[in-house]
Amino acid sequence: MRALIFGASGQDGYYLSKRLEQEGITCIMVSKSGKVGLQGDVADYEFVRALIEKEQPEYIFDFAAISSTRHDVLFENHDTISTGTLNILESVRVYCPNARVFLSGSAMQFRNEGVPINEQTPFEARSPYAVSRIHSVYAGRYYRSQWGLRVYVGYLFNHDSPLRTEHHMNKKIVEAVKRIIAGSDEYIEIGDIEVKKEFNFAGDIVEAIWILVNQDHVHEVVIGSGMAYSIKDFVRYCFQKTGKDWSQYIRGNHAYVPEYQVLVSDPHLMFSLGWKPKMGFEELADMMLEEV
C-alpha cells in the first residue's frame, strides 16, 4: 500500500510517516522546499495530477499550509490550501477515485466564543487563513457528496513536538528556557500570557488521523484533548527546572491583541471512535525541553 503526504516537511508529516511505516505502508513524501522527499508544489495542478496518476496511492494526506493568519500571506494561503485542495481532489476524481483523502482543518476556522468547539460549531472567516480552510472543507464536501470520493477532514487543535520551529510560541519558550539555563539573561516576549489553548502532542494527533481515515461513516471530526492550559502554565512548568523566577524573564506586549482568549475542543466524537491522547501537558513540555 502507498500513501502520499503533501506538506511532509512539518511535524505532522514526520510523525504520520512513522506511524504508517508500522502498518507496512510506503510513504511518498512531498514538500515545497524539497528538504523532505520529493520537491513539489501542491498548488501546481500538473505536478499533483501526474504524481497521483503515477503512484495510485490508497491514502493521500494534505498537511500543506502557510501557518499564519496574517493578511499579508493571503495569496500564499489561498494557493497552498484552497487551490492545493482542489488540485488533489480533482486529480483523485479523475485518476484515483478509490483513494482515501485527508484534509487538514483547523480550530481557527470556527466561531470561537470561549466554549469548547465541536463539529456543529459554525465556521467564521476571521482571517485569510480561515477563509482558505473553510473553502477547503467545502471543496471536500462537494467531492464527497457529488462524486462519491472518500474525503475526510480533521479539525486540528494546537499540537506540538520537538520538531517545531521558534516561529511557534511553545518552541520559542522552550528554546529560551534552555538558553537561560545555560546562562543567558535574555527575556521572552509574549503577547498575552493568559491566553489558554491545548497542548497536544503531534504523535497523538496523527494517530487520531489514521483512525479517522479508516472510518466508513464518519468523515469530519474535531481532534483535540479538550484540555486547555494558559501560556503562563507552560512557562511556569518549563521554568521549574531552572530554579529561577519565571516572572523575571517574561515581557508582555501590551499593544498585542490576541486572536482568542480560550481555544479548546469538544472531542467527544473523536473519543467515541476509540482515540484519546496518550501524552499530557507536562509530558509534552518535558519532551520538548529534552528533545528526545
Image (tube, rainbow, N blue to C red):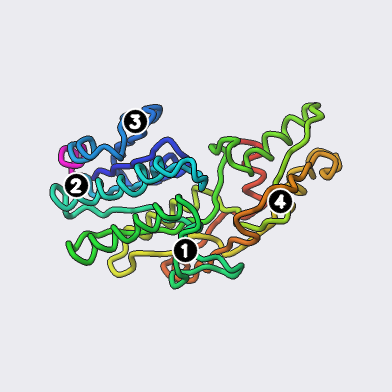
Q: Amino acid at mark 4?
A: Asp
**Quadrant in the picture for residue 218:** bottom left
Which is nearer the N-term, disc 3 or disc 4? Answer: 3
Measure the alpha-carbon separation of dots 3 and 2.
20 Å
Measure the alpha-carbon separation of dots 1 and 4.
23 Å
Residue located beneath label 4 in the image = 192
Q: Label 1: few (<14), some or many (≥20) within 10 Å?
A: some
Residue located beneath label 3 in the image = 37
Contact between labelled residues 1 and 2, with CB atoms less than 8 Å apart: no
Q: Which mark is residue 106?
A: none
Measure the alpha-carbon separation of dots 2 and 1.
29 Å
Q: Which mark is residue 124?
A: 1
Which is nearer the N-term, disc 3 or disc 2? Answer: 3
Residue located beneath label 2 in the image = 91
Q: Nearer the viewer, mark 3 or mark 2?
A: 2
Kindly state the secondary structure of the residue where label 3 is placed: loop
Q: Which stretch did the figure color magenta? A: 51-56
Q: Amino acid at mark 1?
A: Glu
For image coordinates 30% across by 46% down, the residue present is: 83
> Of 144 and 161, which appears nearest the observer?
144
Contact between labelled residues 4 and 3, with CB atoms less than 8 Å apart: no
